[in-house]
Image (spheres, grey):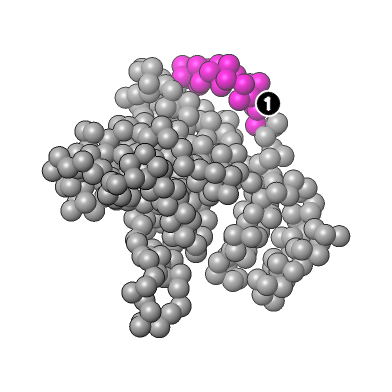
Amino acid sequence: MPELTNPHDKFFKEILSREEVARDFLKNYLPPDVYALINIDSLELSKDTFIDKDLTEYFSDLLYKTDMKDGTSAYIYILFEHKSYREPHTAFDLLRYMVRIWESVLKTKSNTMLPVIIPIVLYHGTKGWEIGRNLKDLFNMPEAVSSYVPDFEYILWDASSYTDEEIKGELMLRAMLLLMKHILRKDLKERLPGIFRLLRDLFEKRTGIEYIETVLKYIVNTASISEVSIEDLEKALDEAAPDKGGDIMPTIAEALIEQGVQKGMKQGLQQGVQQGLLRKAREAIFEILEARFDMVPRSVIESVGTIEDLLFLKVLLKKAATADSIEQYKQIMKELMDG
């Protein structure tokens, strides 16, 4: 299932593609000694792509570059990646992406020093990451050979490790991070007024309206997961901005209609119910497997992601609760899909 069909990934990419939001994130979440090295004013979104068909399922191709403060010709790539599930081989996937970037650099400047790449992973699953962040964590090796194994560490922003009050940044960034944190949790409905309240000052600005459209599309596309209805959205908007909420909802609905996202908000939700049920069933399978066996293998995530039959997914959900091991579950899946 390609990542760009994932509403979480679309939202993540659309918001962090805004340079002012990316700058705000780096200011608040890069290690201070790293942030001190870069010229944040030179930050720009890379128009180059380094994704091939083997990597499209794991990356949304969101890459920034910036100059160093010391004025050297070297520059730093800031590689953003997003995860809603814990994936133990994330460091390896990042390495594959980084190698493609370096290969591209060498094609144009064969004698140049390679640029530093700082990989940043944003994770908003409901459980803590609890995975080593170094490439070497993927190896089981004697100390004597460790110096022959490449290594790097990625920066992790884990939503589950922050309280709402600890999430920092300007209004757009805080709203984005809070929404990503709660979108998979049952308390989203109660959190929406506070999230919309952050955006009150943006209601009268064109760029602000566009941002709110993006936020509402994200919620609508994941409505079956978060169990938020159109009525809930209207109520939250009205509670957050009594003087604006009633006016802005029709504006947003009209914009969404024009974009072909839906034929009216309620009808759009009804049309999205089937896809929503499929997503919810897949996530239930992953949650059970993760709870029982700690990790969900990528092969399972990929296979389940291709299934469009809700009844079949319900069968797999029951098997997830009864399988003795993850290997047995993979075998059951194979037999059912082959049959």
Describe residue 124's horizontal placement relative to residue 37 as left or right: right
The x and y percentages for residue 52 are 54, 44
Residue type of the residue flagged with mark 1: Gln
Residue lying furthest left: 70
Q: Quadrant of residue 330?
A: bottom right
Q: Residues within 10 Å of mark 1 (few under 14, many from 20)?
A: few
Residue name at image x 38 percent, y 23 percent: 208
In the rendered view, tell whether residue 76 sits above or below residue 260. Answer: below
Residue 263: x, y in percent? 66, 21
| Residue at (46, 38) in percent of width and height | 49
Residue 298 or 215: which is nearer the viewer?
Answer: 298
Q: Which residue is mark 1?
A: 267
User: Magenta span: helix, strand or loop, mainly?
Assistant: helix
Residue 195: x and y in percent read 40, 37
Name the image quarter holding residue 2: top right
The residue that appears at 75% across and 63% down in the rendered structure is 333
In the image, residue 190 above or below residue 234: below
**Which residues lie in the magenta part?**
246-269
319 is higher (above) or lower (below) than 40: below
The question of residue 7 being in magenta is answered with no
Depth check: give the residue in front, 234 or 288.
288
